[in-house]
Amino acid sequence: MSDQATARATAPSGSPPQAKTTSFLSAMEVDVRFLGMLGALAVIWIGFDLLSGGTFLTPRNLWNLSVQTASVAVMATGMVLVIVTRNIDLSVGSVLGVTGMIMAVVQSSYLTPMLGFDHPLVWILTLVIGIMAGAIIGGAQGYVIAYLGVPAFIVTLGGLLVWRGAAWWVASGKTIPLTDNNFKLIGGGAEGAIGATWSWAIAAVACVLIALAAFHARRQRQRFRFPLKPVWAEVSTVAVGITAVVAATMVVNSYTLPPVLARRYAEANAIPLPADGSALSIPFGYAVPVLLAIGIGIAMTFVATRTRFGRYVFAIGGNPEAAELAGINTRRVTMMIFALMGALAAIGAAISTARLTSATNAQGTLDELYTIAAAVIGGTSLAGGAGTIAGAMLGALVMQSLQSGMVLLGLDTPLQNIVVGIVLVIAVWLDTMYRKRIR
Amino acid sequence: MAQNTGTPLVEMRDISISFGGIKAVDHVTVDLYPGEVVGLLGHNGAGKSTLIKILSGAYKADAGSIFVNGQKAEIATPRDAKSYGIETIYQTLALADNVDAAANLFLGRELLSPWGTLDDVAMEAATRQVMGRLNPNFRKFKEPVKALSGGQRQSVAIARAIHFNAKILIMDEPTAALGPQETAQVGELIKQLKAEGIGIFLISHDLHDVFDLADRVSVMKNGKLVGSARTTDVSQDDVLGMIILGKCPPGATRGPGAISEKELAAVGAHL
């Protein structure tokens, strides 16, 4: 042991670092904060399950939970970048409202009449137009913040009113129903789930990717002869990931269509009914919005950690002046962050509009607060410079779990709001304590 | 000692900048030759850092011009300055505290993999190499730089400035956060860079340091240049007189900020 210590002390820093003898957790290279959040989620889930007499941890409830979380989770990934750069976006709920309305109007008044009922281009164009509208709205707000120097708080507070008003104005206060059935799949529901076979296919791909990612990381480190994780740690990290994927797939596949829908589905797809007259079991599988949210989470994690843009976002958050002096065009980056946030709000709008199968005036009301809360509970620091996409998505899941758990228990809305508010404050307080400890 | 003939590496001519009516830099002219160290001296608030920030692109001068190798240079942003080979070590270090040493070293000039993504492993390897030369005891490559000591942070800032083949180096109080041993190390580094033909502007409060390392000094007071002198032509006391009183000794070239004999006499009467 002492030999090893001296060897480490005398090695010049230019040489590859020496392998360290460390604890289990650091060998696994696990984020302790993320682990803590998973623990909190487990406590919430088990607690609600006990209180509700076993109705919380059912495939049906968990499946619904995943679908309900999707929209806010998508927006939370963008909110992380906004908050990391010491900004805030209070307008996301209203931007969701207006882009949802734009998509519904464009689809029902222009695209469907032009292209025909359920034409495959309709849903694609609707989505593209919505995302572009969101990016333009966000980019416009970002321009005012970055180039005209108006604080983000004020610009987006104004945006909260402007875009809510615009949504009202676009549809003259009406509720606009969606016309395209393909677009509605984005919202989930019995139609918008991919079924057992495809769910297993996606699970298999995910497992392979997890293993490949670990392998690639190891090869990269070998290239420069950096210390490697012990093989057992590598293997167990991959095993944990694969187990989680398999478990989630089993859960969504054990939620089956109600008998009436199942029969209709079987008739539509020419599946023979069981001869003995027992109920037909057709699993839901993963919901489309959940897959969309996970895909966006992965893409945003990639953007945040593997690209220049992401590096600049964090550098600006850590020290805006230093970023500027290093030659980073901080204004342009700030504007792009808000444009990205607008685009993500539009994707959130697509999910929630498709889920309700229509766009309403009140859609997305208070979503800005849930989105910010999700990011902050997920470990994004309001002081800037720190936050992870995965944490924010987990934060969204925590918020939604609390909410749907309280619905299951039959708590009134005012009481739900009180609990959510208190939990938010406590979560941030715990995080502050944790940060002070690790200093 | 460098022979100051031919074209200077940098010449800042008649530079002025004011902030809200206060002339922080008032018609200052300084120059720098290859392989030369020029010490910039003056009290706090004399305008040294402001002058240097104009050269590094952080501020834009209200009047005056900058010449690099005799060519007029337009420096509006830090990026422009870097494109002329001007690198700066700021007094505040200007590090992003929340990312690691490699990310700071390559901030704004990241190495990319063939797919256009950040090549973190290559950047870390390069960082290990530079840091191994600068500060062999440096080991915290994975931690965000806020977890580093003052000296370690300083060496990251220095590494960033010298890694990209600077021709002109600006060091604003490079030893402010360092212990004696590390200060000596920085002194060695300056001599080494000088031998490589790099021109260095050195801003420091420590007169001894400046006399040890600099070939010439320029003294500023209240935003104006008091005068410039070769360190061989003046004594430390002469330079102190320049800094405190604005009195230009015989061995120095007089600047617009130097006080006249009459004013000096008046000051003397008060003392």
Image (cartoon, coloured by chain):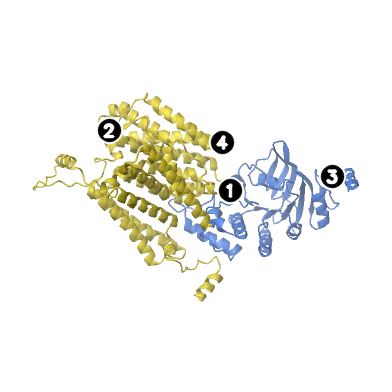
Chain colours: A yellow, B blue
Query: Callout 4: helix, strand or loop?
Result: loop
Q: If the image is split into quadrants, where does the N terminus of chain B sit?
A: bottom right
Disc 3 element: loop
Cα–Cα span, label 1 and label 4 = 18 Å
> What residue sits right under mark 2 in the picture?
A180
The first of marks 4 and 2 along the sequence is 4
Amino acid type for the residue under numbered disc 4? Gly
Looking at this view, name the residue that lies furthest to the top: A172
Q: Which residue is mark 1?
A: A322
In whole angstroms, how far apart are the C-alphas of marks 1 and 2? 50 Å
Whether pointer 1 and pointer 2 mark residues with C-beta atoms closer than 8 Å, the reply is no
Label 1 crowd bin: few (<14), some (14–19), many (20+), radius 10 Å: many
Characterize the local packing of mark 2: few (<14), some (14-19) or many (20 or more) Cα atoms within 10 angstroms.
many
Q: Mark 1 vs mark 4: which is more N-terminal?
A: 4
What amino acid type is highlighted by mark number 3?
Ile
* Residue hosting label 3: B259
Measure the alpha-carbon separation of dots 4 and 2. Answer: 42 Å
Q: Which residue is mark 4?
A: A149
